[in-house]
Image (cartoon, helix red, strand yellow):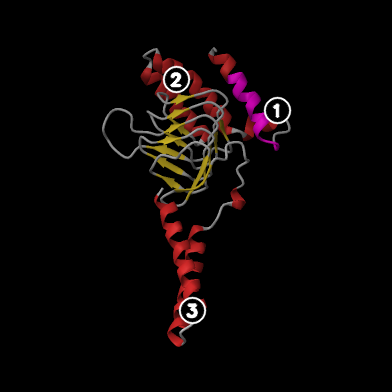
Amino acid sequence: MGIYSKIKEDFANAYKNDPALNSKIDFLFNYPGVWAVAWYRIAHSLYKANFKRFSRMIMGLTQIFTHIDIHPAAQIGSRVFIDHGTGVVIGETAIIEDDVLIYQGVTLGGVSLTHGKRHPTIRKGAVIGAGAKVLGNIEVGEYAKIGANSVVVKPVPSCSTAIGIPAHVIEKGRCKDPFMHNMLPDINKELFEYMLKRVAILEHILVEDNKDLLEQDLELEHIYDSFLKSMKN
């Protein structure tokens, strides 16, 4: 597929992914992510043709107008949609496969100064939530979902959801489910609730020798062990 066909496909994909897009005027002035990817397509072809300085100039100017920083050497597949886009950074050795959705403020960055592959690989159909940071030469699997503001430093399996700082996998085996940001669990809240309940049970045990309370404490301990194991995955 040629550059023009890919850009045309990117434009059509914007209408598919954003119900707020109602007119060509909106598209022209309010979709910097689409325009950044379009200019990347041109710059990337020039970069591969060894016009590296010229390609960097194109993406430098694109960054000024769109506030999106994409290295022309990065590999971006078809129908990649950057929604809103402000603050997105995509590093030199990043690989983004087809049909990936990226929200504003996302960084696909490196954690070392060595040459070679040092940026993430985002597989087909993945969704990267607003403000998320995916760092290092790691892989986010097909149709995986990264919660907003998460910091991902370990690989994320396909069809799973990862949230938190650092990010932990909380769901597996859901490929086609829509990504509902408002339905993500609050891990810190759940941990504090556990601690409060645990303290209350221990206080009752100290006051009176109650077997029922002891059984509740053992059950809560089992839940906590399961929680810790899931956090280590």
Q: Cβ–Cβ below 8 Å for labels 2 and 1?
A: no
Q: CA distance from mark 3 to mark 1?
A: 70 Å
From the viewer's perspective, tell me whether residue 70 is left or right of residue 111: right
Taking the magenta stretch, the answer to whether it contains residue 18 is yes
Disc number lying in front (3 or 1): 3
Residue 31, compared with residue 166, is above or below; it is: above
Disc number lying in front (2 or 3): 3
Amino acid type, callout 2 = His
Identify the residue position indicated by label 3 in the image. 211
Range of residues picked out in magenta: 7-20
Residue 80, compared with residue 88, is above or below; it is: above
Identify the residue position indicated by label 2 in the image. 44
Mark 2 burial class by Cα count in 10 Å: few <14, some 14-19, many 20+: many
From the viewer's perspective, tell me whether residue 226 is left or right of residue 82: left
Of pointers 3 and 1, the one earlier in the residue sequence: 1
Of pointers 2 and 1, the one earlier in the residue sequence: 1
Residue at (46%, 38%) from the top-left corner?
A: 157
Q: Secondary structure at mark 2?
A: helix
Numbered label tally: 3
Identify the residue position indicated by label 1 in the image. 24
Residue closest to the far front: 211
Residue at (45%, 87%) from the top-left corner?
A: 207
Residue 88, position as x, y percentages in the image:
48, 38
Amino acid type, callout 3 = Lys
Of pointers 2 and 3, the one earlier in the residue sequence: 2
Q: Cβ–Cβ below 8 Å for labels 3 and 1?
A: no
Disc number lying in front (2 or 1): 2
The image quarter in which residue 13 lies: top right
Mark 3 burial class by Cα count in 10 Å: few <14, some 14-19, many 20+: few
Taking the magenta stretch, the answer to whether it contains residue 188 is no
